[in-house]
Image: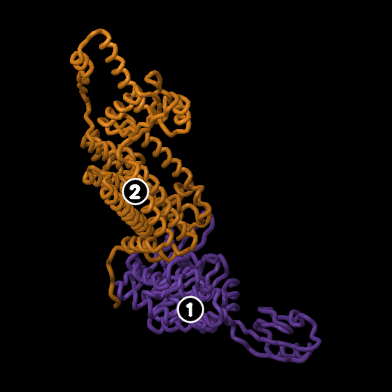
Chain colours: A orange, B purple
């Protein structure tokens, strides 16, 4: 008698999916390109980051003094302003037109910008207005006969204290930024990995290898193994990309809270896994009802629309993480991977919500899997396009 | 013993199988023969569990076949299928693993199978890089790689060149000699006749004859003569003979079935009258004649 291995068939299937795709040249290249993009992004951020910077033109000595005061005021706000002097108003105007400076102050009497409101220079303009208003108030007070001390105490009144109703600390802000980038990237990957599942199913149908496989293992084992293998590979790819991204960002000094960023990525990946299992079962059904790769696009259209709709709902939810839409979106399986991670890192999801969301997602997938397996089993040995209605109506068996 | 018992299967309004039953003993090689659409593929798919029967069951060594038992069956579908982009070696090891072999065993067994089938030097190639003939050999290796207890092959000889067919015939004989029940379907009746001791004949979803070819011949009580006449023999001279039925027309002659009242000598006389007799013999019914007899009877 030959030695028997009792290793689960689905694990053998999963390993094949993992290894064969890992060996695939296309996969290796796309991973490398993604890593390069991430690194390029980090390098660019460290080069051009480090605060906002503006160029300010000045005409006349009075304006130069104002310019210096703007530079000093800007420094307090972590904004760098460089002053460029121009001899005439015409020269300053030309510089503004050419984009060499963001704004120019002419003889302390007017500020020239390209268009109002300025595309970028809003902050600069506000600072100029504040500085010149103070100067004008100062000279007015001087004219009214006040002493230097009186003027100083009047003008340097402390700002109004700000009462924050829901404080958002720097760390949460940074984590949310990480989540936002992560969620956007992952949503694309969700689609890519889902497509792998569907295309893998079609490959087995079109090459007819599925009949050999089904004489050995059950359709459910084949389907589960495929989803598990591709999901694991996808997760590994994302972990690699995230690890490289976070490490590079930290080395470049962009991240102030690397642990927070890693935690945020952890939440994103956790919800990605839930989302992947949910969507990939649907993708498997889409794949099993056609028998040629060319027909796949058509059956995937409803799924693509669902993903795109979920994407927009999710993005909207991200804008206002405490809205009703965001709460609902973070609880429903198609949109939860997009909406929930952000709400968690912002501290806006009470504990029951992530727990409920995860449970709903797992339950929905668990309910979907037997349905998908059934559809898959019925469709997988048929050739040509299969109508969903026929599959639902068919008795529990496969056709030849 | 592999038993197919009362297998029945409909597809919509079409009855593909209508109570098909037959057995294959261990070490027996059975040719499964019938015209297109007779139900061969459906019956074999049910035997290996790719398809479910509406009624009836499949038993192996006296027990109903379940998923665990089926893992030890070897199957080659009529529509060949392999992962085109996978390397031959990886693919066969993978299939052997799915059939329950340990990794080491799967590898050793794969190496043995590709050696026997003469594709050992192509194991590092992707399947799509192989010629169709070699792909066919790999397909057979896929059915054999886990040293199956039962072999079910759907049209294994289709598409093979004579050399490949000889290799396949040799492998099947070896498997049967090792005690494996082998059942394969084929359109090539002469090949089945050469290779198999026994056959199962299926027609319109029913088994119309089953047994050793020799026994089926012996049971065929018809008296057949083969006669060929050269020269200016008028076409169909034999058709006018009383008590004679044409079984199979041949160039210049025919295989004729004689009814009880007609003697061989009468046919020979008529042949002589028609021209120069080149061939005259009493013949055993061939498989196709047995098949025709079974379908008509």
Q: Quadrant of residue A101 in the image?
A: top left
Q: Position of residue B185 (x, y in %)?
A: 51, 73
Chain at tag 2:
A
SS for dot 1:
strand
Disc 2 target residue = A43
Mark linked to residue A29: none
Farthest-out residue, top = A144
Residue A316: percent from left, percent from top = 37, 33
Q: Quadrant of residue A147?
A: top left
Q: Nearer the viewer, mark 2 or mark 1?
A: 2
Q: Nearer the viewer, residue B264 or B291?
A: B291
Can the viewer see residue A366?
no
Classify B278 as above or below B246: below
Evaluate whether residue B155 shows in this view: yes
Chain letter of disc 1 in the image: B
Which quadrant of the figure has residue A196?
bottom left
Residue with the mark numbered 1: B211
> How many labels sit on residues?
2
Image check: A246 left or right of A158? right
Q: Quadrant of the N terminus of chain A?
A: bottom left
User: Disc 2 on helix, strand or loop?
Assistant: helix
Left or right relative to B87: residue A155 = left
How would you rate the neighbour count of disc 1 (Cα within 10 Å): few for under 14, some for 14-19, many for 20 or more? some
């Amino acid at each position: 008698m030959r030695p028997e291995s009792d290793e689960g068939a689905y694990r053998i299937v999963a390993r094949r999916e993992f290894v064969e795709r890992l060996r695939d040249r296309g996969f290796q290249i796309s991973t490398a390109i993604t890593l390069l993009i991430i690194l390029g992004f980090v390098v660019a951020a460290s080069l051009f980051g480090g605060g906002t910077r503006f160029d300010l033109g000045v005409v006349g000595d009075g304006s130069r003094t104002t310019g210096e005061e703007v530079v000093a005021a800007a420094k307090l706000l972590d904004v760098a302003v460089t002053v460029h002097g121009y001899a005439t108003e015409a020269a300053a105007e030309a510089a503004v037109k050419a984009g060499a400076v963001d704004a120019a102050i002419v003889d302390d009497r007017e500020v020239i910008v390209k268009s109002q409101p300025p595309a970028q220079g809003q902050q600069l303009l506000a600072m100029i207005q504040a500085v010149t208003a103070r100067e004008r108030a100062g000279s007015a007070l001087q004219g009214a006969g006040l002493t230097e001390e009186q003027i100083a105490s009047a003008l340097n009144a402390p700002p109004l204290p700000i009462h924050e109703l829901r404080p958002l600390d720097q760390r949460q802000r940074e984590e949310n930024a990480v989540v936002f980038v992560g969620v956007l990237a992952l949503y694309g990957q969700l689609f890519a990995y889902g497509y792998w599942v569907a295309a893998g199913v079609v490959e087995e149908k079109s090459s007819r290898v599925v009949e050999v496989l089904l004489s050995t293992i059950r359709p459910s084992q084949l389907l589960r193994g495929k989803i598990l293998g591709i999901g694991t590979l996808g997760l590994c790819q994302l972990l690699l990309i995230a690890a490289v991204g976070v490490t590079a960002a930290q080395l470049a000094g962009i991240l102030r809270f690397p642990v927070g960023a890693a935690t945020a990525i952890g939440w994103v990946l956790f919800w990605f896994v839930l989302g992947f299992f949910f969507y990939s079962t649907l993708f498997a059904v889409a794949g099993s009802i056609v028998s040629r790769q060319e027909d796949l696009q058509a059956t995937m259209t409803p799924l693509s629309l669902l993903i795109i709709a979920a994407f927009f709902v999710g993005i909207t939810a991200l804008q206002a993480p405490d809205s009703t839409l965001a709460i609902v979106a973070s609880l429903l399986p198609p949109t939860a991977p997009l909406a929930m991670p952000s709400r968690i890192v912002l501290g806006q999801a009470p504990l029951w919500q992530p727990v409920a969301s995860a449970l709903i997602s797992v339950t929905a997938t668990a309910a979907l899997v037997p349905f998908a397996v059934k559809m898959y089993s019925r469709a997988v040995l048929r050739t040509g396009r299969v109508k969903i209605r026929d599959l639902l109506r068919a008795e529990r068996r496969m056709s030849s | 013993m592999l038993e197919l018992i009362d297998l029945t299967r409909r597809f919509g309004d079409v009855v593909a199988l209508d109570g098909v039953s037959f057995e294959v003993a261990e070490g027996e090689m059975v040719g499964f023969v019938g015209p297109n659409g007779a139900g061969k593929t459906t019956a074999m798919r049910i035997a290996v569990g790719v398809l479910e029967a509406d009624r009836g069951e499949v038993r192996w060594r006296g027990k109903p076949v379940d998923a665990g038992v089926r893992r030890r069956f070897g199957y080659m579908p009529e529509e060949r299928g392999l992962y085109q982009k996978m390397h031959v070696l990886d693919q066969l090891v993978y299939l052997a693993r799915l059939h329950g072999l340990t990794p080491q065993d799967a590898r050793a067994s794969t190496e043995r199978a590709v050696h026997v089938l003469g594709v050992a030097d192509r194991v590092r190639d992707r399947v799509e890089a192989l010629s169709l003939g070699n792909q066919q050999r790999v397909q057979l290796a896929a059915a054999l790689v886990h040293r199956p207890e039962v072999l079910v092959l759907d049209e294994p000889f289709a598409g093979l060149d004579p050399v490949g067919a000889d290799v396949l015939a040799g492998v099947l004989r070896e498997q049967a000699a090792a005690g494996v029940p082998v059942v394969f379907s084929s359109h090539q009746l002469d090949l089945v006749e050469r290779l198999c001791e026994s056959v199962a004949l299926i027609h319109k979803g029913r088994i119309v004859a089953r047994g050793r070819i020799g026994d089926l011949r012996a049971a065929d009580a018809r008296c057949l003569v083969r006669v060929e006449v050269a020269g200016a023999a008028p076409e169909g001279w034999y058709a006018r003979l009383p008590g004679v039925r044409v079984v199979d027309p041949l160039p210049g002659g025919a295989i004729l079935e004689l009814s009880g009242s007609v003697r061989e000598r009468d046919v020979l006389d008529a042949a002589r009258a028609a021209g120069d007799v080149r061939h005259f013999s009493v013949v055993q019914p061939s498989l196709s004649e047995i098949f025709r007899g079974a379908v008509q009877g």
